[in-house]
Image (cartoon, rainbow, N blue to C red):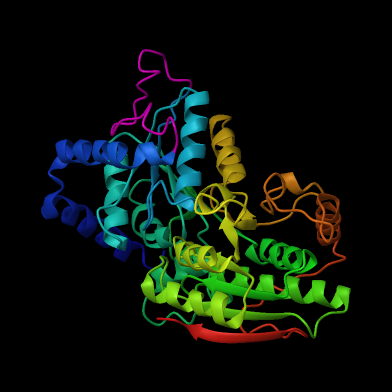
Amino acid sequence: MKKRLLAMLLAGMMAFSMTACGSGGDDAKKDNATSQESNDGEAAGDDANDGETADGDSKEDGDKEPASDMNIAMITDSGDITDQSFNQTTYETSKAWAEQNNVPFTYYKPDSDSDEARAASVDQAVAGGANVLMMPGYMFAAAVVAKAELYPDVKFVALDVGAGDLLEKGVGEGYDYNPDNYDVKEYYHSDNVYCCTYQEELSGYMAGYAAVKLGYKHLGFLGGMSVPAVTRFGYGYLQGADAAAQELGIEGEVEAEYVCGGQFYGDADITAAMDTWYGTKGVEVVFACGGGIFTSAVEAAVKADGKVIGVDSDQSPIIDASKEGLTVTSAMKGLATTVNTVLTEIKAGNWSNYAGKIENLGMVSENPEENFVQLPIETTQWGEGFTEDDYRALVKAMYNGEVKVSNDIKAFPKTKIKTTDYGSIK
């Protein structure tokens, strides 16, 4: 296998680095993980601080016999378990599944935002007894490349990690960013790895379509970094807004602003840009897509009486905490469905149906709730222009192929509505 020797050498170096740079062995690992529980658990949910320790033992189920030999660990990427996005959804879903199935569970937060730190957390988790690793986000590609072969008996579940992400880390310098030119399995140990990505353009389309149908005519898209997943969300959003405007015959009245922040968190500069959108340009609703960058859109929207569209999960609870009714809808990925399905299949002995696969998850049904990309039915602000029944009809048309959405991110979408691409704020 190409790069296999290099991957193993890197794995060894990372493991050595973890020890040499102050992890302090098992005692330090326990102290670190326990610290994460006390610092992050309360904000993640009422029971987020119950049940798990650094060694993955359930406090509530400590005297019970485990239901299987599974021992689950979740590792955060650059955020934490209170991010109201990928980390929190993966944490809460994995924890709930583990409690329901009497399986040990814990989580690890890397000590820095780096490939080396995430790889070190893999080492910590395995040393703590984990044999199923839940890793949310494309940032885990390097850890998969470096560690999967080193731990062949551990099941790696890499959520939102695609072939391109693995190749970027596996090929390294010289990678041409065209995954079709490579056999990705030559660059990582695929036997014990399941990867999946999501068809973000579909839920992005739903959100843009819904916004225009609900009467919003000046839309905005605020992305985090211009990575493929963010771009698919954004380009789908523009396509959906354009389609709705054409159906209503108002394409000349609808316009959309498009920008990326250059980072996955909000700050004063990005908030100032959103202040200009809402306050000066007259933007009515912004689709904020990319980790914590939504905070800048929320701050600006509150001041200007604007609206926000969430991403990845139903973000209305955290967005609406700033102002009731702020969230129009959220363009969601079925992350919880993926986590529950894969863990259940592992317990049932069906890991072979997943190992070695890189799946692109999207629509599997005319029923919105069963799909891996969707809008939240309970919290979307339905109106006369776009009802729940209209949404269900849209999903059916998309599933049947009557409505087609392009996933091409090589060029900015051509639309009949006016769109302005501002590039990146930073």
Residue 374 spot, x, y in % from top left:
69, 53
- Residue shown at 48% from the left, 38% from the top: 92
Residue in view at x 58 percent, y 51 percent:
324
Q: Which residues are magenta?
A: 45-67
Q: Reply above or below: 339 against 292.
A: above
Q: Quadrant of the N terminus?
A: bottom left
Q: Is residue 361 above or below residue 64?
A: below
- Count of marks, rendered view: 0
Task: Report the front residue among 62 and 195.
Answer: 62
Horizontal and vertical percent position of residue 321: 51, 49
Q: Nearer the viewer, residue 62 or 298?
A: 298
Most common secondary structure along the magenta stretch: loop
Q: Nearer the viewer, residue 409 or 388?
A: 388
Q: Is residue 36 above or below residue 381?
A: above
Left of 296 or right of it: where is 405?
A: right
What residue is shown at x 46% (from left), y 61% (from top)?
A: 291
Q: Quadrant location of the C terminus?
A: bottom left
Q: Position of residue 393 (x, y in %)?
A: 86, 55
Taking the magenta stretch, the answer to whether it contains residue 349 is: no
Residue 423, visible in the rendered structure: yes
Residue 337: name its quadrant: top right
Is residue 178 in sight in this rendering? Answer: no
Q: Quadrant of residue 421?
A: bottom right
